[in-house]
């Protein structure tokens, strides 16, 4: 299962674009409310989550995605569940992805040391130990980071290519009239 964590104040497009694209690719992507069944985005759009944190079977999570937004990124960073799911994904040999301000959650946990990464401008100092590239989307090993809402589709396509194969990502691009 691919878990997309939603905390109040998440950036809607950064969460829902990967969700949509990954589901189009036939992958089991689900939204997980870290504080309950409904999470309210940074633009006051409520989203009914597929499940709550206490319903997640950590041994079944292969990928975790952390959308940005404020104060959503800080809410994710402060949540003990974020640590639990990241540790489970690492144990499961899975993939971790974060976009916009959310890579701060990875940097503060030391997960970006010695890796290339990117984030929303102004959060570079939070990417402790990373080589900050400024690129739109960066994958280094099992971690993918992206700059922000404007690259949400590229972020989603990168994750689709990594999880379902490059052909699936290309087909999504064609089906949404991107290519």
Image: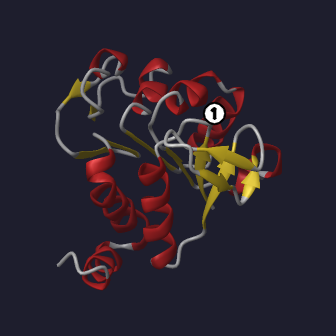
Judge by depth and name the residue closer to the eye, 51 or 117: 51
Q: How many marks?
A: 1
Q: Position of residue 113 (x, y in %)?
A: 35, 23
Residue 29's place in the image compared with 32, above or below, is below
Q: Position of residue 138 (x, y in %)?
A: 26, 44
The residue drawn where x is 40% and y is 32% is: 103
The residue drawn where x is 44% and y is 38% is: 68
Quadrant of the rendered image containing residue 97: top left
Quadrant of the rendered image containing residue 72: top right
Image quadrant in which the N terminus is located: bottom right
Residue found at the very far right of the displayed protein: 54
The image's colouring method is secondary structure
Q: Is label 1 in a helix, a strand or a loop?
A: helix
Image quadrant in which the C terminus is located: bottom left
The residue drawn where x is 37% and y is 17% is: 126
Q: Position of residue 52 (x, y in %)?
A: 77, 49
The residue drawn where x is 48% and y is 68% is: 20
Would you name the residue on which mark 1 appears? Answer: 82
Residue 50's place in the image compared with 34, above or below, is below
Position of residue 135 in the picture relative to residue 86 (left or right): left
Position of residue 101 in the picture relative to residue 87 (left or right): left
Tell me the crowding category of disc 1: few under 14, some 14 to 19, or many 20 or more residues within 10 angstroms, Cα based: many
């Amino acid at each position: 299962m691919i878990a997309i964590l939603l905390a109040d104040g998440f950036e809607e497009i950064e969460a829902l674009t990967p969700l949509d694209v990954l589901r189009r690719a036939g992958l089991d992507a689900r939204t997980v409310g870290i504080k309950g069944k409904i999470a309210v985005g940074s633009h006051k759009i409520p989203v009914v989550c597929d499940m709550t944190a206490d319903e997640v079977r950590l041994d079944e999570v292969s990928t975790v995605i952390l959308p940005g937004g404020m104060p959503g990124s800080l809410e994710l960073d402060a949540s003990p569940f974020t640590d639990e799911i990241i540790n489970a994904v690492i144990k499961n040999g899975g993939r971790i992805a974060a976009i916009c301000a959310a890579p701060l959650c990875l940097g503060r946990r030391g997960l970006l040391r010695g890796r290339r990464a990117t984030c929303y401008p102004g959060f570079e100092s939070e990417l402790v130990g990373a080589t900050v590239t400024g690129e739109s989307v960066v994958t280094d090993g099992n971690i993918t980071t992206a700059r922000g809402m404007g690259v949400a589709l590229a972020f989603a396509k990168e994750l689709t290519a990594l999880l379902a194969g490059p052909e699936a990502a290309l087909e999504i691009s064609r089906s949404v009239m991107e290519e």
